[in-house]
Amino acid sequence: MLNLVLLNVDGVECRYGSIKVLENISLSVKEGDFVGILGPNGSGKTTLLKSISRTLKPYRGTILLNEADIYTLKGIEVARQMAVVPQDTSIGFSFAALDVVLMGRNPHMTRFQMEGEKDLAIARKAMQLTNTWRLAERPINELSGGEKQRVIIARALAQEPKILLLDEPMTHLDIINQLEIMDLVKNLCVKEKLIILAVFHDLNLAARYCTSAILLKNGAIFAAGGLDEVLTSENIKNVFRVNAIVKKHLVTNSLFVLPLSPQKSSPAKKCSIHLICGAGTGTALMKVLLDEGYSVTAGVLNVLDTDFETAQFLKIPVTTEAPFSPITEKTHNANLAMISKASTVVLTSVPFGFGNLQNLEAALAAVDMGIPTFAIEEVPIERRDFTQGKAQALLAELKNKGAVFVKNQNELLSLLNVSVEKLKIAKEERDRILDHLKPEETPKKTKFRGKW
Amino acid sequence: MGTDEVESTYFRRTSRWKLIIILLILALIVTIIVSLNVGYAQIPFPNILAILTKQIPLLNSFVDSSLVLPRHELIILQLRLPRIIAGVVVGAALASSGVVYQGVFKNPMADSYLLGVSSGAAVGASLSMLFGVGFSVFGLGLVQVAAFVGGVSTMFLVYNIARVGSKVPVTMLLLCGLAVNFFMYSIVALLEVIAGESLHSIVIWLMGGFSNVLWTQIWAVLPFITIGMVVAYFYVRDLNLLALGEETAQNLGVNVEKVKTRLLVFASMVAAAAVSLCGLIGFVGLMVPHITRLVIGPDHRILFPASIITGAIYLVICDAVARVIMTPFASSAELPVGIITMLAGAPFFIILLKRKKQSYSL
């Protein structure tokens, strides 16, 4: 690339007193780059921004702006090229919004110069871009948090910077404001070739706007580079200690991150459950069952099916069929083999067509094998039977053979948990427990035996 | 609100500022002349104007000498004018340092005495009244010199205690100032206990006043006050930027630590010089900047000069009141001006604050 490298951070180490907060940070940013600085609380994001903005002199290392060390430059020389939008600004005295924006012109003025028409035109443009011009004469302390932050951003723009540092600039803004401001910043980055360095808490916002990112952990760079390399499930788990799904979004075509709640540490149960699902009906259940400590298998699922993708993510073993293909005899048998190893089978309220009708037969086979089988009936079979009644007939047969029908996932879970709880004792007192379970909770033909 | 309206209002601002300053200067001149008329001896305005004009070269040939009585000339030029000019100088000094302190500290409670100037000066003055009666330094009373030295050195003491490495955090300054002030005032209290005959003069000095001010005393403090104000005025726009917070000011090109140090040192010097001239006069340094800000807004480029003139006007008026208010009761007695500044100023300030409550925040 012919791009001029504008900002070079080289081996920076920062300390507060004797406490090291940043260690060996190096990065090189050129014009037109939009770099996200990511990391959990206390990982040194703001400190890094402070050292780049000439506020906190690094203990070691240099920060070069066009090959000049910013700490040997005068503050005002840096201010002509670099603007900072801080996390939170408390403004003493009720200056009018326009006055605050005009203060951004300070680096470009001599000491006793008054702001002229040019300065006012620049301030006005900045305020129009941030949609704050109508607030020009209002006292800054009477504005709402979002309006105030927009004025602060306008002030930074009035500085006409080459580099814009944003420290969690979106904290006070609602969604539409966030998007508008980020669109504006992105636009400046692309059109005016600005360097943008922004601290983000919202990984999705970062994913949507940044061209690259650095991920900090305990004051050191954990990962850096393109978003694809930095925003991965593994990195997020390592740095934020949270499981997350990272995918390309269909509509925005940018990565999106879906954090899952921190893994519950339910003790592992010696009980494996096979799910017969599809079309997303098993997705939530997979996660829940895993959280509860069950081991889970699933099948038959078509590759690319939502449930298949979830299973892939959760590393659940699956019997698969090719995309958009009916279940073949071979896969059906593979599925039966998987079922035979399970201690319980759960059939979700998946819609049935001729392509997956065999999954229903698999459930019947499970009952025949003597495996306790549950069927969730959230949607009545009439509304999800696309086989001219064949599925209905099979489901009725399943009911007759003694499968347990439940209304929803919660009912299933309480039955499963009760069963597991009881079955701990069952090893010694199996008969008594079976009697106890039979009356109300479970329909009469339930058989608990075999693989608990 | 039309776009052009905002812009034209904005460009009218500079001329509005000039107008404010001109009006305030006129008000100050009128106040001075009117208060020259106030006092025990009745001297009519034509005589006062004649005496004043006579002092001005070129214009003095036009003065009707019959209006200038030697006795009146003495009262006006040697008794009333020095204390009025002292009022102008001290009022301006305290108000200017108050603006600087409030700007640097972003704190509405900040005033010119915050960094120990007042208590240090009080210790210096009390000590000299107790032990050094009759001494003089360069023709000045020892009390004045001791008060100035006490004030300035206490300020440096506070500043050095508050320093953390190369930085001086404002919270540290505030708290150290508070602690040192208490310490110094307890020394003053101690001195008062053992003062005996000097007690009266110490108490009067602590309340502040302008009786018996001499021209030499005024000339002695004037350079300190003028230099301090000029230096502070140099940084008025930086004071605006500091309102956005020290880090933002830094990011906008302000050398925060340097500016802060210079502003505080010179503002303290101004305050110490004022205190050395007239003792402790409260309220001016705290309230005059607030009152001015309520009326003309927070921009230090106008607030600073306007507060200076307002402070001068305010103190001259208060001193005139102090001179005459006791006349019905005892013909020659007068109140310490510090009492008037607070008695009159506090209610006025509260009324103003109540009326503008919504838009005034610090």
Image (cartoon, coloured by chain):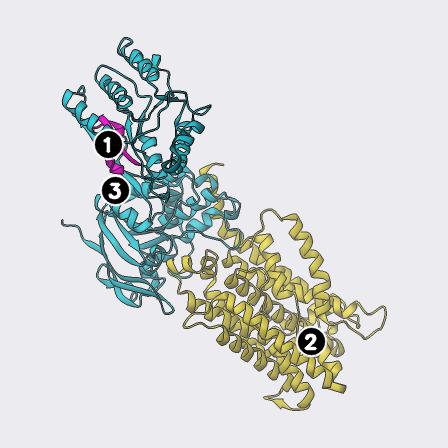
Q: Is residue A200 visible?
A: yes
In the displayed orientation, state which residue is furthest to the top.
A388
Which of the 4 image quadrants contains residue B210? bottom right
Which amino acid type is shown beneath numbered disc 1?
A: Lys
Mark 2 belongs to which subunit? B
Residue shown at the point (64%, 78%) measured from the top left: B122
Mark 1 belongs to which subunit? A
Which of the 4 image quadrants contains residue B241? bottom left
Which amino acid type is shown beneath numbered disc 3?
A: Lys
Q: How many marks?
A: 3
Q: Which residue is mark 1?
A: A341
Where in the figure is residue A430, as x and y percent of width and height? 38, 33
Residues in magenta, as a range: A295-318
Colour cyan belongs to chain: A
Figure check: A312 above or below A243: above
Mark 3 belongs to which subunit? A
- Quadrant housing the C terminus of chain B: bottom right
Between marks 1 and 2, how big is the CA–CA gap?
96 Å
Q: Which residue is mark 3?
A: A191
Contact check, label 3 and label 1, Cβ < 8 Å: no
Q: Which residue is mark 2?
A: B206
Between marks 3 and 1, how big is the CA–CA gap?
61 Å
Colour yellow belongs to chain: B
Local SS, label 1: loop
Q: Is residue B16 left or right of residue B28?
A: left
